[in-house]
Image (tube, rainbow, N blue to C red):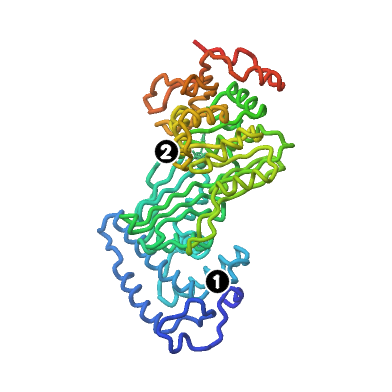
Amino acid sequence: MAMFSRFKKPEDGRPRATTAPVAEPLKAPVAKPSVTRAAVIAPRVKQAAQHKPVAQAAVQDKEKKRKERLGEIKVELHKRLLENLNLSALETAPEASLRAEIAAIAGEALEQMSIVLNKEDRSTLNQELYDEVMGLGPLEPLLKDDTINDILVNGPQQIFIERDGKLELSNITFKDERHLLRIIDKIVSAVGRRVDESNPYVDARLSDGSRFNAMVPPIAVDGSLVSIRKFKKEKLGVDDLVRFGAFTEEMAAYLQAAVACRLNVIVSGGTGSGKTTTLNALSSFIDNSERILTIEDTAELQLQQTHVGRMESRPANVEGKGAVSQRDCLRNALRMRPDRIIVGETRGEEVIDMLQAMNTGHDGSMTTIHANSARDGISRLENMIAMAGIEMPLKAVRSQIASAVNLIVQASRLQDGSRRMVSITEITGMEGDVISMQEVFRFERLGLEPNGKILGRFNATGVRSYYAERFRQWGYDLPAEIYEPIA
Ligand SMILES: Nc1ncnc2c1ncn2[C@@H]1O[C@H](COP(=O)(O)OP(=O)(O)OP(=O)(O)O)[C@@H](O)[C@H]1O
Ligand SMILES: [Mg+2]
């Protein structure tokens, strides 16, 4: 044990928590756990050990009991680890020595509790302990699994995961609500936030970049609700998306022309439909010489260009101070001489500044909105403007939108889990009080395969792009055939 002693709390031999009845959390270091405590714990764990399933019990039952027992041991060992480890030294410790240290402390504690485990249980236990101490407990294996996109926790006993566009219930659980709350607390306190009864929900970003949202009781009725959108190091590029059938090469060529020719683009779509992914892929068409500023509530975009300034808004702190909204960032961004502005998602009053930016020299800007169709997207914009308290006749609002936005790209997650660009729609101006638009490409559903897969194809609608002449002038002369529909 002495070999990794630098991760152990210094043992100064002083008696622990002398007069104060409540231990002061900030007062470190604390001496080793008292003997009495271990003595109290040991019989309880031993008792649990005696409850071992008898031979005739069903295998399943046995397995369940085994898991429960391991769970109990884990909780106990975890407590001991927290008492024994010098947590501040952990930050900089190399992983291998930490693992060894944890295994050593756990081994010693198991011995004290007279518990013998087989090799496999022991290595599972060590891994789980490591995850508890250093990571996010039961969430850790899910976070590490690259095939998982989303993690959705509905109380301690139910964790759903999304793989290949499909939601499934995982076999992973938290011990109880307290365990879940402890992990939530760990996440949010790492980013200087707090979540409790008075601040029952919080948005945060995990250290790996994943987006995190939690809501705790009493607002969450059956236990804390957590949603995590995993951060992908390798963002899906245009080629990947074409390969996955999110859109076609023709559509990609069109989009490239649109972005390179500085059309203002809005990616519209529902939750998790692939808006951010699409926006990120579209950004790859921006020339490397341009200065791009990105504004997001949670920094998710990963632009490939060299000249990129990234901004992340910030909610108010516990005292209600220090909030920096997307709108604040956007207004400031306009003074930072950007060539293009990308707003991760327009959802509120920043809509006004976004439209103004698009109208006044920052063309080629892009954003996403939460809407189910291009038309719906326009109504969303109108609503956001109204909600921001701008008193303008509807016609004026619409003509603002019509002159600011050139293109709406609709992303969608279909029932079979596939994500597709179901429509590309151009805004062509105003006809009376109505914004006129034309769809250039769309996804046509043709049927359903027996296995539930949606059959369909992308097709041109037959209209030539309103911007075709601009594309040509800018050197993106798209062949006329791409606008021709397949019969
Ligand atoms: N065409 C695609 N094929 C496969 N996976 C995709 C595709 N598009 C997006 N994804 C994956 O789906 C998940 C959701 O995508 P994304 O974050 O872009 O959605 P979103 O619409 O921005 O979601 P939200 O509304 O939560 O912001 C991500 O994990 C992403 O990698
Ligand atoms: Mg998004």
Vertical comparison of 136 with 424: above or below: below
Which numbered circle lies on residue 258? Answer: none
Q: Nearer the viewer, residue 340 or 277?
A: 340
Q: Looking at the image, which is closer to me, 283 or 120? A: 283
User: Which residue is label 1 attached to?
Assistant: 87
User: Which quarter of the figure is the N terminus placed in?
Assistant: bottom right
- The local crowd at label 1, few if under 14, some if 14 to 19, many if 20 or more residues have their Cα within 10 Å, is some
The residue drawn where x is 43% and y is 34% is 417
Q: Which amino acid does label 1 sit on?
A: Leu
Residue 442 versus residue 306 in the image, above or below: above
Badge 2 vs badge 1, beta-carbon distance below 8 Å: no
x 58%, y 71%: residue: 88
Q: Residue 332, image x and y in percent?
A: 63, 48
Q: Give, as a three-letter code, the residue at label 2.
A: Lys
Is residue 105 at all visible to an observer of this figure? yes
Where's residue 236, x and y in %?
58, 37
Left or right: 72 in relation to 473? left
Q: Mark 2 points at which residue?
A: 166
